[in-house]
Amino acid sequence: MSLIPIRSGSPLGGEAERSDAARNRELLLKAARELIEECGADGLTMDRLAERAGVGKGTVFRRFGSRAGLMMTLLSDSEAAFQGRFMFGPPPLGPGAPPLDRLVAFGAERIAYVLEFGELARAADASAYNRYDVPAAVLWHRHIEMLLRAAGVTADPWLMAMSLSSTLDPERLLYAVRVHHVAPERLAESWRELVTRVVSCPGGAPRQDSASRPDEG
Amino acid sequence: MSLIPIRSGSPLGGEAERSDAARNRELLLKAARELIEECGADGLTMDRLAERAGVGKGTVFRRFGSRAGLMMTLLSDSEAAFQGRFMFGPPPLGPGAPPLDRLVAFGAERIAYVLEFGELARAADASAYNRYDVPAAVLWHRHIEMLLRAAGVTADPWLMAMSLSSTLDPERLLYAVRVHHVAPERLAESWRELVTRVVSCPGGAPRQDSASRPDEG
DNA sequence: ATAATATCCGGACCGCAGTCCGTTTAGCAT
DNA sequence: ATGCTAAACGGACTGCGGTCCGGATATTAT
């Protein structure tokens, strides 16, 4: 099952793939995994990768588009598995459980995922503006938004989903864990608190008087 | 008033500054503002800046440490003003108002700030791990955490403050506004909803049964 | 004025991601 | 087999942020 293919590594729209291209793709993926094993994700450079795989640098970029694209390809299996679990898997993560439970489970899974593939996930975050436009990110966002709506949250679910997503950002999670030594369970617990409050609180109607004017007064 | 100096541009701990150093600093800041005016923040490169200012490239980096450091210096005036307002200014942003009102006002101000200095703020976000360790970010975080505690939020205020901060991330705010054409007022309103729910909701006690196991089951 | 020295200056240099384009080759038609 | 063509190849090249270190200079002591 392919679900939302993060990045296949195959040519963009093409159906057929030339044999040398396929061979080189395998060589590159193998070399990439080796390099990451040896030097860590941050130690993988495109030059070294090309050299290790015995191909030209241009080949690397034609195959994966960018360094972030390569990282996404390396993550695509586990990413697809994650997508499968929260879309079609058993509750509470998959359909069947109450929306709040699904949200809580989603965060817990995501946190575990980031902690497992941390360096890769971080490196896969495209550096550009379109960081939030990669298919996987869009899918997570839509999923959270859908759950918020299902839970009866009426206050701008799109932006609320964005706020919640930002909490699960790999860079932030890794910062909390690696720099501040926050225990992963604490992260999950805080996420549970956060979504619980967002979902099960009535929220306030906008006020008339104060505190919503950006200009100074 | 200097408050928390983001980055003075002066040598790190030193008291005195040699006259040529001071002159070059001014030349560089002037050239930087010109270049940003002409090419935008993303169009400013360190080579062009050095050339425009008529100094060597090494001088640029000794002065500001990095590109992000330069951007912070350019922002330091407005940043200091912002800090002054939320720490010592009039309510509801400053002390005197209820914590929730202060939180709401903080977000609104921050959103306006990011929209005004968007490119700069984005460029000033250090690319490295220590992105969240710059003095200004630490100060915002502590401020939010303090307000959460004052509002009676007992559930891990440190992480909760981190989640709330992430909502105000320049990159995300700019993405919403520039790519998805979200109106700034909508951002502020969503922030208001979010903090209101976080603050005024009792939150749930951890459950015994489900939805907190990261491992698959 | 002169010497001593701590600081600053400048631009060559590095490693990096990403691009370009002349060359090679796989796949196919004949 | 042979020729054709579209696709893939490869590595030199660019522009970038950031570093390094020999040389220049402001400052202070004498």
Image (cartoon, coloured by chain):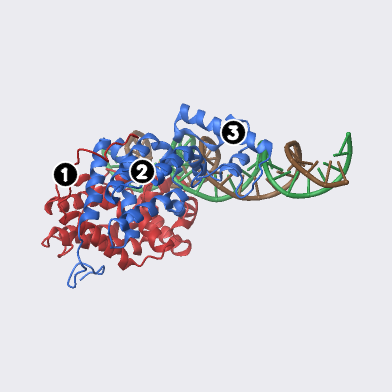
Chain colours: A blue, B red, C brown, D green
In front of the other: A87 or A9:
A87
Q: Position of residue B103 (x, y in %)?
A: 20, 58
Residue B117 in which image quadrant: bottom left
Q: What residue is shown with label 3?
A: A26
* Mark 1 and mark 3 residues within 8 Å of each other at the beta carbon: no
In front of the other: A195 or B85:
A195
Taking the image as shown, residue A187 lies to the left or right of residue A41, namely left
Question: Considering the numbered disc 3 on the image, is that residue within a helix, a strand or a loop?
Answer: helix
Q: Position of residue B96 (x, y in %)?
A: 10, 62
Q: Position of residue B66 (x, y in %)?
A: 40, 46
On screen, B17 above or below B196?
A: above
The chain carrying label 2 is: A
Q: What residue is shown with label 2?
A: A171
Same subunit under labels 3 and 2? yes
- Marks 1 and 2, how far apart at CA: 28 Å
The chain carrying label 1 is: B
- Marks 3 and 2, how far apart at CA: 29 Å
Q: Closer to the observer: label 1 or label 3?
A: 1
Which amino acid type corresponds to the residue marked 3 in the rendered image? Answer: Glu
Question: Considering the numbered disc 2 on the image, is that residue within a helix, a strand or a loop?
Answer: helix
Task: Say which residue appears at 28% left-offset and 40% top-offset.
Answer: A176
Taking the image as shown, residue A135 lies to the left or right of residue A201, namely right
Circle 3 crowding by C-alpha within 10 Å: few under 14, some 14–19, many from 20 = some
Question: Considering the numbered disc 1 on the image, is that residue within a helix, a strand or a loop?
Answer: loop
Instruction: Check the image and name the residue furthest to the top.
Output: A38
In front of the other: A88 or A35:
A88
Which amino acid type corresponds to the residue marked 2 in the rendered image? Answer: Glu
Quadrant housing the C terminus of chain A: bottom left
The chain carrying label 3 is: A
